[in-house]
Amino acid sequence: MTSGWKVGTVSATRTETPTGRSITIDVPGWPGNIAGQHVDVRLTAPDGYQAVRSYSIASVGDDERVQLAVDRLPDGEVSPYLVDDLLPGDQLEFRGPLGGWFVWRPEVGDVVQTEPVQLIGGGSGIVPLIAMIRSHAASANPAKFRLLYSVRSPEDAFFADELASLAGDDLEITWVYTRKAPEGWPMPAHRLTKDQLASASFDVTQNPSVFVCGPTGFVESVASWLVDLGHDPARVKTERFGGA
Amino acid sequence: MGIISRGFTGRSREVNPALPPGQFLTEDFPVLSAGPTPDIDTADWEFSIRTESGEAHRWTWDDLMALPIEDIATDIHCVTRWSKLGTSWRGVSLDTLFADVDTSSGYTMAHSYGGYTTNVPLEDLLDGKAWIAFEFDGEPLAPEHGGPARLLVPHLYFWKSAKWIRGLVMHDSDDPGFWEQNGYHLYGDPWREQRYW
């Protein structure tokens, strides 16, 4: 599954936010991935120095075309290069896909997954969640999806147009703006609260699978509120980034 | 050497012999957990070691605090590639906890509050290599970092240092724990880059 590094060639980049962009790479021999998995990305400098980081994959399926979305960390070594310097035609190395826990499949074996899926993302934590949303849409899976997406401002949302186009009965989206809300938004910018989480997410009685991804503080708050609201901790899967 | 990434220079060429291959230094303390952080009161906390005979050795929080406590200075290495050098902990050595345990099994499964598991060979827990740690950097261990107490096995990747530890169960074979069933290496030596299957 993870043996060996594969060379990928950047086919497109797209500015998503003031600090982040999505990158599409053709990786011949990529075996495909399920929604939520990661990939190791390796960069090599002219003198042979190498740096490797792991990124969530935004794309899903059997394709040899892989999409990442990366947020620039102010003191990062790899993310500023990926966000600011990388151009179509550039080559990087990839190993993966990796990870078998924070994943969603439309079918497990022959069994179609019909339980509701609650996705909760903060900032670039949307990346593995958009893969699940894409997997859900592409497979016409009947499960109900809800997404609660917390961003600083409308400009800080990754995949905003795509999310808007997919929103509907099968994907309900609740936006939380923490610093600046869009003009005419019914409430001022605020951080997510436990009450809002309770009203915007599937109730415990609906027995949802829950995926939470974002900065450590955000995930810590949301996951503990979910447990307070009665969710079985075993059904709340999390991915955190950054320190505490 | 891999293909050159045009325009990539990287940050530093300083060779740090304390850094295993493929790791980078962080001053931060990232948090990686598969689920919610459990809320555990030390009044309810218990640690046990269960052997192949079914015998269980148990310690309450007060029992643990009454044992010899060691200061530990060590480097830690996460499979997600960050390393933190010279961290300071306090805890009780597994040598102390295993002193009266009679077992001929060679492997352990660590079990945590919240359901996490990870497998560690017994020899990797003995001879001053592992602790039940409850202080980090002079403070009680924070819940998101595994408090009130976590296993500390710093010579292996840090997912082996199970947060919210509640017990060890002796096994005759090296059965995979949680991450080991989800793509991570059975042993996890950072110096041999045993990250994934």
Image: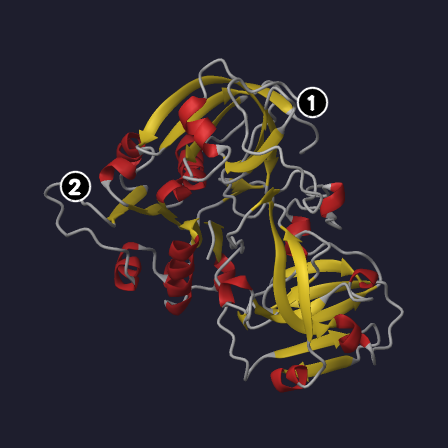
- Where is residue B85? Give x, y as percent: 62, 53
Residue that numbered label 1 is attached to? B1
Q: Amino acid at mark 2?
A: Pro
* Left or right position of B102 against B18: right
Seen in the picture, residue B157 relative to A56 is either above or below; the reply is below
- The answer to whether the residues at label 1 and label 2 have Cβ atoms under 8 Å apart is no
Asked if badge 1 and badge 2 are on a common chain, one would say no
Q: Amino acid at mark 1?
A: Met
- Where is residue A231? Give x, y as percent: 42, 64
Farthest residue, direction right? B104
Q: Quadrant of the N terminus of chain A?
A: top right
Q: Residue at x 52, y 47 (%)?
A: A102
Q: Label 1, secondary structure: give it.
A: loop
Q: Residue at x 76, y 42 (%)?
A: B192
Farthest residue, direction front? B14
Crowd rating for badge 2 (residues with CA inside 10 Å; few <14, some 14–19, many 20+): few
Farthest residue, direction top? A89
- Where is residue B132? Give x, y as percent: 67, 71
Q: Which mark is residue A182?
A: 2
* Left or right position of B95 against A102: right
> What whole-number distance in Å separates the C-alpha atoms at marks 1 and 2?
48 Å
Seen in the picture, residue A80 relative to B58 is either above or below; the reply is above
- Where is residue A9? Give x, y as percent: 53, 17
Farthest residue, direction left? A184
* Left or right position of B63 against A227: right
Q: Chain of mark 2?
A: A
Q: How is the image coloured?
A: secondary structure
Q: Chain of mark 1?
A: B
